[in-house]
Structures are given as C-alpha cells and as structure tokens.
Amino acid sequence: MSKVFVNIGLSLDGYMAPEGMTMSDPGHMGWGAKWGAMMSWLMKQQYFRETLLHMGPGGETGPVNDLVRNTVERIGANVMGKRMFDQGEVAWPEDAPFHTPVYVLTHQKREPWVRPGGTTFHFVNDGPERALALAREAAGGRDVRISGGADVIQQYLELDAIDELEIALAPVLFGSGRRLFENLGQPGTQFRIDRVLDGEGATHLRYVRQ
C-alpha cells in the first residue's frame, strides 16, 4: 500500500519558513538568505540540479544525492495548501518542479491548471481528507507527499494520516517564522527513528509510524 509522507527542510529552531517570506521579494526581512542557507545542501545535489532545476551536468553525488533521488522517484502525487501554492505560482518555472498531480487545499474554486512536464494543479474545496483520497487515487500505487506548508502538515498529523516524516534539519536559526508543530493539537500517531544520515549542510532524519 502506498505511504503518505512529509519531506521538508527545517531550521534548527523548528521553522519551515522564515518570517516575511514572500516569493515576490526575496530581500524582504532577509528571508531569501535565511531560506537559502537552510536549503543550500539541496541545491548542491546532482540529481536535484540535473533533474529538477535543469542546470546541466554537475553537482554532488553520494548518500544524500541518492536520498534526494529516492524521495523524488517515490512520489506519485503531492498535496499542498493554498498559501504554498500562491507563493510558488509566482516563482516556479513554467515546468513546475513536481511532475505529478498536485492537490491544493483551498476555498477558492478554480479549474485544474496544467503545466508542462506532467504537473497539474487540482484545487480541492472539500477538505484535507478529500484531497488525500484524490491524491492516493492519482498516485497509482506510488506514495503521496504532503508538501506543506506547516498548517497543512499539522492537519494531516491530527488526522493520523502521516506514515513517515523526513526532515532535513539544517544548522541555521531563523528566530521567527512558521513553525512546523506550532499549532499541533493531539496527534494520534507515534513515530520511531528509522534513519539518521549526516550531511554537510543538514542532518537527514526519517521517522516512521510505530
């Protein structure tokens, strides 16, 4: 059976996104530099650079690069919130970096948005459970990634729907922003440590349901 998983970068003080993050202004409150420092490890990986950024050959290989490859190749569909979509809509290239169906939780009605390279954004008005059901169906046996933001991940944790948490914990401090677990209620799932991989720019932690 397919898995539902989270795969994100996280600052050392627990933030997914720094304060003031708006894709239209990377200099606002210095968020661009902070986010760049948190995700710098990913930008160096060969698979990410060649496959998702189309930057040509080059980049780091090894266990972290293999981890990135395995993560991307297991995804059959993505789920995200409207805030994350709104930020990305103005910043993602025409060939959006998902290459799967993406289900956007929103109250806004909108027709599917088809992008080159296999990404189609579907806008779901019926809540997180319906979005996940559609994503599972579209994934065709592959796994479903809950992409974010933090509030959407919290919703699926509270629904006891997350099978795995993959967190790239970077040694940077944001001080403020959007915390991963800030508004979490009483999640039913308990996790155990499955893997710890030390990288140059982040420690890669994988937790699975007990």
Image (cartoon, rainbow, N blue to C red):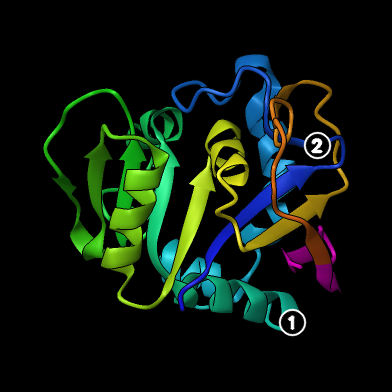
What residue appears at the point 85 percent right and 40 percent down from the top-left corner?
Answer: 172
| Magenta-drawn segment | 193-210
State if disc 1 and disc 2 touch (CB < 8 Å). Answer: no
| Residue 192 occupies quadrant | bottom right
Magenta-span inclusion, residue 194: yes
Which amino acid is tagged 1?
A: Pro
Q: Is residue 39 above or below residue 140?
A: above
Left or right for 119, reference 82:
left
**Residue 60: x, y in percent?**
68, 76
Q: Can residue 62 be seen in this view?
A: yes
* Residue corresponding to mark 1: 63
Label 1 sits on a secondary structure element that is helix
Q: Could you give the CA–CA distance between mark 2 and mark 1, rounded to whole angstroms?
A: 24 Å
* Residue corresponding to mark 2: 14
Mark 2 Cα within 10 Å, few/some/many (few <14, many 20+)? many
Looking at the image, the residue that sits furthest to the left is 111
